[in-house]
Structures are given as C-alpha cells and as structure tokens.
Image: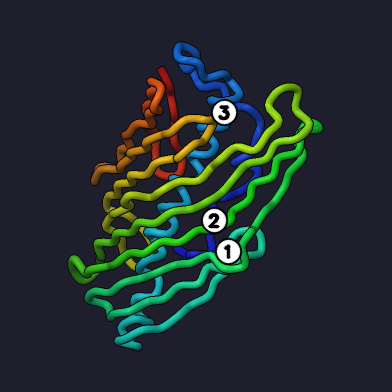
Amino acid sequence: MSLTRTHLCISVVLGAAVALSGCFDRGLSSWEKARLESRATDDLNNALDELAGSTENIEDADAARGTFEVDRAGYAGCTRHYVFDGDAAAGSIDMELQGVPCSAALTLDDVRYEYAITEWTWSGSWEQFDEDWWDVVRSGAASSALTIEGSERNDGVYDASFTMHEASGRTDAEGNFAFWAIDYSYSGFLDRAWDVTVAQDEDGAVSGSITSNDGVTCVVSGEQYDYVIDCE
C-alpha cells in the first residue's frame, strides 16, 4: 500500500454532521459527535496507512543494506521525508512532514472549514516474522488545528493535535494486515483530552474505545477503514 495514500481528506474530516446514536448523555452535541467521529476515523486510517507503508521499501532496504532516504507527497502540498535504515530482516524508519504549515479548506453550506498541520513526525521499526510477514511498530505526534468560520455558534479554532503512543501490527509487503492495534491521545480536541485505543484481531473484527477526561465513553466497532463510533 502506498505511503502517498492519505486519509486526511477534507471532505471526510469536515463532512456533513453524522448522526451517532446515544451520545447526548454527557454533554456532546450532535455537532461535536460528528467532529469526533470524523477526526478519529481520519487519524485511525492515516495511522494504518503509515503502518502498512513501513514495509513498502523492504526490497529497497534489502538492496541498500544501510541508510537511504525517500520523499513522497504529503498533505496539502507538504512532503513526507522518510529515512530508512536496515535490510529485509529488520530496520528502522523515521518520518518528518516538511514544508509545514500545510492547510486545506472547504466551504460547506456557507461554513468555511480549514484543517492545518504545523508539525508531524514519527519513528518506527520493522522485523521479519516469516517469509511473507513483518511486525511493524511506530510512535510519534502531530500538531494540527481545525478552524471554522461562518457557522451560527461553532466558529473558532479547534486543537486537533495528538500523540501516537503506539501503532503496531503484522503486515505483508502489499500492506495487508493480519492484525493491528493503535493507541493514541488528543490533547485538547473539542476542549477535552481523549484516549483512543482500537484494534483488529486475526478474524478481522475491530473493537476499541474513545474516552474523554470528563466522562464521555465511545465504543468503536466495524471494519478496517470503516468504523462505527457510538458514544454513551
């Protein structure tokens, strides 16, 4: 799977409000629920893309048997700069988004949404499990924000920064997963701190949770790249 694939798609991040059942009990409005679903879905999918891409250069790494660098298109005109070190058996990978800040905007129903990234870095590694599969892991952080203008009562700048504590999985050279697990947190999205833990088992079932520092609990289910988020 190509590292150029991105799920930071403005149409997804900023799309029309999505009705999520059961999220009213602890103070989340329907608008906030839609923003949380869009943000979490986007960041989960992007984390999977990066994990899958860890093995994209296995053949190059084996040929180089050392350090080499690769640049690929990033978000909104920025560049993802990768540094690989190792061979097919094992190695490390670092990524830094260059050309920041990167931003893209969309106007929907006379409301303008702009998503901007000011910093994004991560580091990871791969280790061969058998002839066809590798265990991959990474961690990192991104600084980003969502700006809204022209709404009736939701205008403002919303912190979308997150810390990726660990994303791990077993993948083949084509980016297919046997299983994966993602654990990260938002520092202040919707004026809350959020912990996100989601995993897919070897049978393909996705399960997890999103919890806030003020008592909001959301259950994550569904399929890889297609999640259902229900909050209580």
Give the residue furthest to the right: 110
Picture coordinates of residue 56, whole percent (x, y): 40, 70
Q: Tell me where residue 14 sits by quadrant.
A: top right
Picture coordinates of residue 48, whole percent (x, y): 41, 53
Picture coordinates of residue 100, whole percent (x, y): 61, 62
Q: Which colour scheme is used?
A: rainbow
Question: At numbered mark 3, what does the secondary structure look like: helix, strand or loop?
Answer: helix
Q: Observer-nearest residue: 152 or 60?
A: 152
Q: Observer-nearest residue: 11 or 91?
A: 91
Q: Are marks 1 and 2 in contact (CB under 8 Å)?
A: yes
Residue at image mark 1: 74
- Residue found 42% across the figure and 59% down from its top: 50
Name the amino acid, label 1.
Answer: Gly
Question: At numbered mark 1, what does the secondary structure look like: helix, strand or loop?
Answer: loop
> Which quadrant holds the C terminus?
top left
Question: At numbered mark 2, what does the secondary structure look like: helix, strand or loop?
Answer: loop
